[in-house]
Amino acid sequence: MAQVVPSTNNNPDWMQRPPAIPGCPPGLEYLSQLDCLILNQNVSLVEAFTGWEKNNKYSIKNTQGNQIYFAAEESSGCMRGCCGSQRGFEIFIMDSSNQKVIKISRELKVCAGSSWCAGCCDCCAHEVIIEAPVGTVVGYVKQKGAFGKSPYDILDENQEPVLRIKCPRCIFNGPVFSCDNDFKILTMDGETQVGKLSKVYAGFAKEMFTQADNFSINFPTDLSVKTKAALIGALFLIDFTYFEGE
């Protein structure tokens, strides 16, 4: 696979690195201070004018516009061309020193999201694994069931559920729909909303000519940094499931 390279977004203004925190995976210290993240997918002019699917790249920022991380997908051209949004992938999230602090991975599942597989088992459900640092699993995101807008469970490193993401009843995408899509982050009993993932309308030109998506994540400041990292993984999974390739 091609080597991941840092963003070339005209020398972005990076957030100052917080002091190290005992027991915190290196590079996740930033997340301990934040209750919101903004993710902007980098626009590819090649993709805009040729329709060729390129590896996704994202800038991850705080609400002041300071960049925290740069994220880059690794997948083969064959995988992107033949499997589209169902493709397996690895997304590496890097800090300002180009150190890989989070890895998000998904295996190819041809049956994922298929109506003919909905009733059989969870083996066809969408899921990702989150590592921080690379090689150390800190969480999982697994869809409950294999069809449509089934909820997603956020699991810790021991695969114990900690949060649930509920999909909206209607999901709008594309240049015609100039509205946001909110995915509620709930406690496991479904009674209390603690945050949300939002797909933000990017503007007509981006929606019409590219697959550049913009998202925000809101969560409690005191939420575990590992759970926050898992929510980033959930965001990428939701992007690929509902908004990639439209």
Image (tube, rainbow, N blue to C red):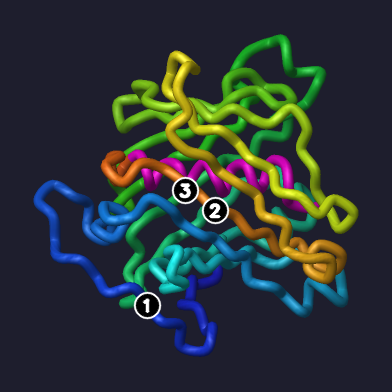
Ranked by sequence position, the earlier of labels 3 and 1 is: 1
Q: Quadrant of residue 169?
A: top right
Q: Is residue 169 above or below residue 243?
A: above
Let me know if residue 52 appears in the view: no
Whether the magenta-drawn stretch holds residue 63 is answered as no
- List the residue tagged with mark 2: 216
What element does badge 2 sit on?
strand
Q: Residue 145: x, y in percent?
A: 63, 18
Ranked by sequence position, the earlier of labels 3 and 2 is: 2
User: In percent of the image, x 72 and y 34: which residue is there?
Assistant: 110
Residue in front for this viewpoint, 83 or 113: 113
- Disc 3 or disc 2, which is closer to the eye? 2
Q: Residue 99: x, y in percent?
A: 32, 69
Q: Bin the neighbour count of mark 2 within 10 Å (Cα to Cα): few under 14, some 14-19, many 20 and up.
A: many
What element does badge 1 sit on?
loop
Q: Bin the neighbour count of mark 3 within 10 Å (Cα to Cα): few under 14, some 14-19, many 20 and up.
A: many
Q: For the view shown, which residue lies furthest in the left direction?
A: 22
Q: Is residue 196 above or below residue 161?
A: below
Residue type highlighted by circle 1:
Trp
- List the residue tagged with mark 3: 232
What element does badge 3 sit on?
helix
Residue type highlighted by circle 2:
Ser
* Type of secondary structure dominating the magenta stretch: helix
| Alpha carbon distance from label 3 to label 2 | 10 Å
Judged left or right of residue 245, residue 123 is: left
The answer to whether marks 3 and 1 mark residues whose Cβ atoms lie closer than 8 Å is no
User: Where does the N terminus fall, quadrant-wise?
Assistant: bottom right
Q: Is residue 118 above or below residue 141?
A: above
- List the residue tagged with mark 1: 14
User: In percent of the image, x 27 and y 74: which residue is there?
Assistant: 16
Ranked by sequence position, the earlier of labels 2 and 1 is: 1
Q: Which residues are magenta?
A: 227-246
